[in-house]
Amino acid sequence: MSAPTPPEPSAVSDEILREHPEFAEPHMLEDDESVPPRPEEEVADAVRDR
């Protein structure tokens, strides 16, 4: 008995986008620019800037 052939990745992604077109739209990470950064973001920025 042989294993079934998996579908092509592009066919799978096309099918998912047909079922969920909202997945194709980019999402805003933060809608409110006045929100201060989280403490871990400030730490990461400090480490990255060294």
Image (cartoon, rainbow, N blue to C red):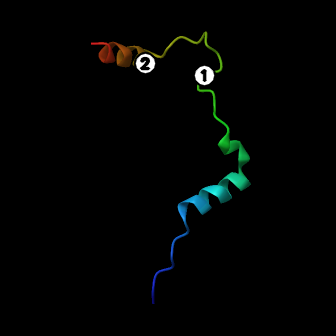
Q: Quadrant of residue 1?
A: bottom left
Kindly identify which residue carries mark 2: 41
> Is residue 13 depicted above or below 39 in this figure?
below
> Is residue 17 depicted above or below 7 in this figure?
above
User: Cβ–Cβ below 8 Å for labels 1 and 2?
Assistant: no
Dot 2 falls on a residue whose secondary structure is: helix
Tell me the residue at 43%/18% (across/down): 41
Tell me the residue at 67%/38% (across/down): 25
Per the rendering, the mark at residue 18 is none
Dot 1 crowding, Cα within 10 Å, few <14, some 14–19, many 20+: few
* Total count of labels: 2
In the foreground, 2 or 35: 2
Tell me the residue at 63%/27% (across/down): 28
In the foreground, 21 or 31: 21
> Is residue 1 depicted above or below 20 in this figure?
below
Q: Residue 33: percent from the left, percent from the top?
A: 61, 13
Q: Quadrant of residue 48?
A: top left
Q: Residue 9: percent from the left, percent from the top?
A: 54, 61
Quarter of the image that includes the C terminus: top left
Task: Work out how far the residue at label 1 is from the one at label 2, CA to CA, in angstroms.
Answer: 13 Å
Kindly identify which residue carries mark 1: 30
Give the left or right position of residue 40, taking residue 35 as reference: left
Residue farthest along the left direction in this orientation? 50
Q: Identify residue type, mark 1.
A: Glu
Q: Quadrant of residue 45?
A: top left
Q: Residue 32: percent from the left, percent from the top?
A: 64, 16
Q: Identify residue type, mark 2.
A: Glu
Dot 1 falls on a residue whose secondary structure is: loop
Residue farthest along the bottom direction in this orientation? 1
Q: Residue 12: percent from the left, percent from the top?
A: 60, 61
Dot 2 crowding, Cα within 10 Å, few <14, some 14–19, many 20+: few
